[in-house]
Image: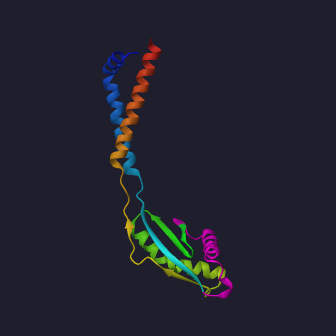
């Protein structure tokens, strides 16, 4: 088909195209409103062995600690090795208070979990992060609406094209 034919067809069905396009935009708006916001913060901890038998290479020691922490008790927290004996904990929660509470309880939980497995006085957990910086959740309202509009238009154009194809 030529461009003129497409334009004539689209102008003939402009109400249907506009309705589905607007419906897609409204769908993007509704999707954006129901998205759960995620607050996040990152906390660094330095792990230092106190007992001579625990002194391994720094990398092995950090991997041991990481393995112990990966076994459980830290839901909603991503743990990543930054450097030897230095681990980064990324805390995600639905509201700012939950993030603050999880960050403040993290040091106690680390000492408790490591104390159960290694012994209470064998590893010291030293917080490196001085001030807690909480990242606010991003709102992709405009992007969601634009994606909804685009999907609505594509769906309408596909429906019109299919209708014209089977009518011919």
The colour scheme used to paint the residues is rainbow
Please say if 104 is above or below 136.
below
Of 43 and 38, the residue lying toward us: 43
Q: Please check the rendered image and state whether residue 96 is part of the magenta-colored stretch, yes or no.
A: no
Q: Please check the rendered image and state whether residue 58 is part of the magenta-colored stretch, yes or no.
A: yes
Where residue 135 sits: x, y (%)?
38, 64
- Write down the quadrant of residue 162 in the picture: top left
User: Would you say 18 lies left or right of 102 here?
Assistant: left
Where residue 116 sits: x, y (%)?
64, 81
User: Would you say 168 lies left or right of 146 here?
Assistant: right
Residue most extreme to the top: 168
Instruction: Please tell me how many numbered marks the rendered image carries.
Output: 0
User: Would you say 55 lies left or right of 89 here?
Assistant: right
Of 55 and 13, the residue lying toward us: 55
**Quarter occupied by the N terminus:** top left
Of 40 and 66, the residue lying toward us: 66
Which span is picked out in magenta?
Answer: 50-78
Please say if 14 is above or below 49.
above
User: Would you say 118 lies left or right of 1 here?
Assistant: right
**Quarter occupied by the C terminus:** top left
Please say if 142 is above or below 18.
below
Of 58 and 13, the residue lying toward us: 58
For the point 43% across and 21% down, the residue is 161
Residue most extreme to the right: 53
For the point 35% across and 43% down, the residue is 145
Where residue 31 sits: x, y (%)?
40, 46
For the point 48% across and 74% down, the residue is 44
For the point 40% across and 22% down, the residue is 160
Where residue 10 sits: x, y (%)?
34, 21
């Amino acid at each position: 088909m030529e461009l003129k034919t497409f334009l004539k067809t689209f102008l003939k069905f402009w109400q249907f195209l506009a309705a589905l396009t607007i419906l897609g935009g409204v769908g993007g708006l509704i999707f954006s409103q129901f998205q759960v916001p995620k607050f996040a913060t990152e906390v660094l901890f330095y792990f230092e062995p106190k007992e001579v038998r625990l002194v391994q290479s720094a990398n092995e020691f950090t991997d041991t600690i990481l393995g112990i922490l990966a076994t459980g008790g830290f839901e909603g927290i991503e743990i990543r090795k930054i450097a030897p004996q230095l681990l980064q904990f990324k805390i995600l929660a639905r509201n700012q208070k939950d993030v603050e509470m999880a960050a403040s309880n993290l040091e106690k939980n680390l000492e408790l979990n490591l104390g159960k497995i290694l012994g209470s006085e064998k590893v010291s957990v030293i917080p490196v992060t001085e001030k807690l910086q909480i990242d606010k959740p991003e709102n992709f309202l405009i992007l969601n609406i634009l994606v909804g509009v685009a999907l609505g238009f594509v769906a309408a154009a596909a429906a019109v094209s299919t209708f014209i194809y089977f009518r011919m």
